[in-house]
Amino acid sequence: VDFVNSLIGISVESSKMADLCNRIQLGPARIIPDGQTGEDVLEVTVPPTRSDILHAVDVAEDVGIAHGYNNIVRTVPGTCTVGREQPLNQLGDLLRDEIGRAGYTEVLTHGLCSTADNFTALGRPVTAAVKLSNPANVEYEVVRTTLLPGLLKTLQHNKSMSFAGGFKLFEISDVVLPDSECVVSETVVGARNSRRGCATFTGPSSGFEIIHGLVDRIMTLCEVAPEAGYVASSGSAYKSVYCKEGWEYTIRELRGDGSYFPGRGAEVLLKRPGGDFEP
């Protein structure tokens, strides 16, 4: 009862609230005292025709309708807050805009995929992943741990496109990784979301330098400076821009990943203030 009153912003007695529920096809409704707190608890009967009732807030909405929205007294909120976009989402939106300006087409792929697509088809060993206990079909067995399978499937279904000038795709989205220590609302959920970015270039040439250039562009936008040795290997191509102090990056040859041809893969190493380079 207190939850319904606080949510709607009214002060209705328990008996009247039960009567309102009886009038809006949520009856028989009754008031039951809570044995621990002594507060009044509203119990309603949801008929099979009310498939829209899924949560206590749905009952509160119907109580507000029965009470009459015009009868709710307008009040000034007790708190004054200003909403804003989450920093991670804001960064993702800015990167999407800039990558799109570089000629890449954004795609949005499924968060579920098969074990074969997520591991075997990429030449990677099958490791831990969040699995569905009862998947609809073989294509929705696990929650993806990488964005690459979705982009490759997009290429597979768009083979009719012209690749003469190069076909660029990218996606910035979440993957789900097993994590036995991740806690949400005081509950160990066993998994966590990780925001990732993935881009592909398909054309008559290998295009390694194109993806390499995209990595440099993203790091420049994030104000991360290239390591001195990395700059020296670039000759006069590098132009100094403002970067955050202590943040650096470099690349090295990627080894042991069957997704890429030997010698044609690289991994990005990031150095945080006071730390060492890490993948």
Image (cartoon, rainbow, N blue to C red):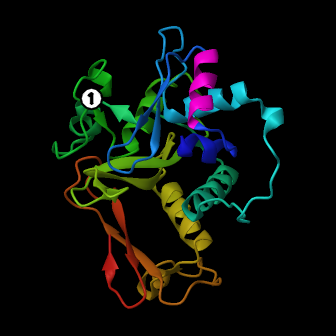
Q: Is residue 177 above or below residue 4?
A: below
- Which secondary structure is most common in the magenta stretch? helix
Asked if the magenta segment contains residue 22, the reply would be yes
Q: Is residue 220 above or below residue 64?
A: below
The magenta span reads 14-23
For this view, does 195 lie left or right of residue 189?
right
Image location of residue 29, percent across then percent down:
50, 22
Q: Amino acid at mark 1?
A: Glu
Image location of residue 172, percent across then percent down:
52, 49
Residue at the image point whose x is 50% and y is 56% from the top: 211
Is 132 or 215 nearer to us in this picture?
A: 132
Write down the residue under mark 1: 141
Which image quarter: residue 34?
Answer: top left
How crowded is the residue under tag 1: few (<14 C-alpha within 10 Å), some, or many (20+)?
A: many
Which image quarter: residue 186?
Answer: bottom left
Is 138 or 240 nearer to us in this picture?
A: 138
Q: Is there any visible trace of residue 77 in the rendered image? A: yes
Which image quarter: residue 124?
Answer: top left
Label 1's element?
loop
For this view, does 259 lie left or right of residue 76?
left
